[in-house]
Structure formats: C-alpha cells, structure tokens
Amino acid sequence: MARKPILAGNWKMHGSTAEAKALAGGLAAKVGQQTDRGVILGPPFTALATTLDAVKGTNIIVSAQNMHFEEKGAFTGEVSPTMLQDLGVTHVILGHSERREIFGETDELINKKVASALAHDLTAILCVGETLDQRDAGKTNDVVTGQVKAGLQGVTTAQAPKIILAYEPVWAIGTGRVATPEQAQDVHAAIRACVNGLGLPGDDIAILYGGSVKPDNVDGLMACPDIDGALVGGASLKVEDFTRIVEFQS
Ligand code: 13P
C-alpha cells in the first residue's frame, strides 16, 4: 500500500512569534499547496497560534511538541490536549528523546500521553530511538521495539490512523551524524514488523526518520521502502532548507 510521505519540522525551543510568522509564512508560500505529501510544522507552544494563522488556507498541518495527559488541573507549566484542540492544533509530538533524556519521561508516561492524545482526536507522533551505547551493544532493535510496544499499549486498530511513528537515533540528533539509509531502513522494517505483531496495521502507519536530516541526505533516506518521511530539527528552521526537504526526490 502506498503511504503518503510526511515531512515534519520540529522547531524545538526556537522562534519568537515574528520568526514563526516569517518561517511559517515562507513555507506556506513554497509548499502550502502540496497534496501528494504531508507537511507538518511543530513550533513551540508560544508560537502555535501565530503558525496556525500563517498557514491558514494551505494544506500545512501544525503540531505541538508535547502535552500533559490530563485535560486540566493543578499541573503548573503544563498544556493539555483540550487546550491544543481549542487552538486548532491537530497533531502532537510525544516521547521525543529530549523529553525522555532531559525531562525524565518514561515509557509509561509517554503511553498515557499517547492514549490521551488519541482520546482527544489528536494525531500522536510517537518518537523512539536508541543511544549510541545501546547501538554499540547491539541492542538497537530491542530498545526501539520496546519503546514502540510500550508507547502503543492499549492503542486499537480504529485509532491507528491517528498514529505516526518517528525513529530518531539519539546519536544522530543535532550531531550532523545521520544514520545511513541502510541503518535507518533496518530499524524502520523492525518497527513495522513490531507494529504488525501488535495486531495493528503496520503497513498503513507512517514511520518517519529523524536525526540530522538535511537537503543533501533526504533523497537517499526517502528512497528506502520503509522510510515514509522525516522529522527534522535544525534544517526545519530555514525556509529554503525545509522546502528542499519537502521537495525530496527519489
Ligand atoms: P536534527 O534534525 O536537528 O538532528 O533534530 C532531529 C530531531 O530531534 C527532530 O525531532
């Protein structure tokens, strides 16, 4: 089955509202009318409204980078799924390695967030990935499929269309050291087999690669059969670079 490619930008903690307006507006003009591939922008919370406004009338989707699993309550500093819905946000990145490593998010917490996102009709972009030590120890597929199983626990086939997976090897994030297409393809195939093994329609779920994706390496990655898109950090902050990534050729 043909899965539609998805090119997603994770802006991380970058961008004033003015910068978000310029970046999203520039991308709206360049790639806003794409129909054969999905384009997702992930600004920080403070720029979500500005970004939504800048892409209005285009096919570009806006994603948050995180959320709490509860709808409301005494959770100082947190943002809820209903707050995201209220803004018009439809997607949320969950379980990014920076959330796992820097903020101590566990598989159990991430699974609660996935369940909550789906319960609120938000598409969850669930991130998984191994560290360099884990790769060197030959544990890559065990670690990654373990994160997939834990993150997707309780997810039903009916909810599967609202799941996007992202394989982001920790050693490739922000390092300039991209996984080779072969390395990425191997893990993507293992993830897809794992999802099928869970009884979910793995062949229908997009699996994005993330970690130092740039205009000059996107084509080789996108040529791999199980790589359905990219989750891009640094190179998503420049209109020209992200446009070239969206317009990958393979
Ligand atoms: P870089 O593209 O900057 O390596 O970041 C990848 C990433 O973490 C996207 O979520």
Image (cartoon, helix red, strand yellow):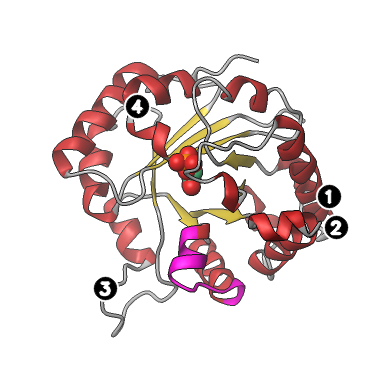
From where the camera sits, is residue 163 visible?
A: no
Q: Compared to 205, does 128 lie above or below?
A: below
Q: Nearer the viewer, mark 2 or mark 3?
A: 3
Is tag 2's residue or tag 3's residue first in the polypeptide sequence?
A: 3
Q: Are marks 2 and 3 in contact (CB under 8 Å)?
A: no
Residue 168 on image: x %, y %: 59, 48
- How far apart marks 4 and 3 lie (CA) works out to 31 Å
Residue 103 inside the magenta-drawn segment? yes
The residue singled out by tag 4 in the image is: 58
Q: Residues within 10 Å of mark 1 (few under 14, many from 20)?
A: some
The residue singled out by tag 1 in the image is: 193
Report the label total.
Answer: 4
- Secondary structure beneath dot 1 equals helix
**Front position in the image: 137 or 102:** 137
- Secondary structure beneath dot 3 equals loop
The residue singled out by tag 3 in the image is: 77
- Secondary structure beneath dot 2 equals helix
Q: Nearer the viewer, mark 4 or mark 3?
A: 3
Q: Are marks 2 and 1 in contact (CB under 8 Å)?
A: yes
Q: Compared to 132, does 174 lie above or below?
A: above
Q: Nearer the viewer, mark 1 or mark 4?
A: 1
Query: What span is in magenta?
Result: 98-108
Q: Compared to 84, does 100 lie above or below?
A: below
The residue singled out by tag 2 in the image is: 197
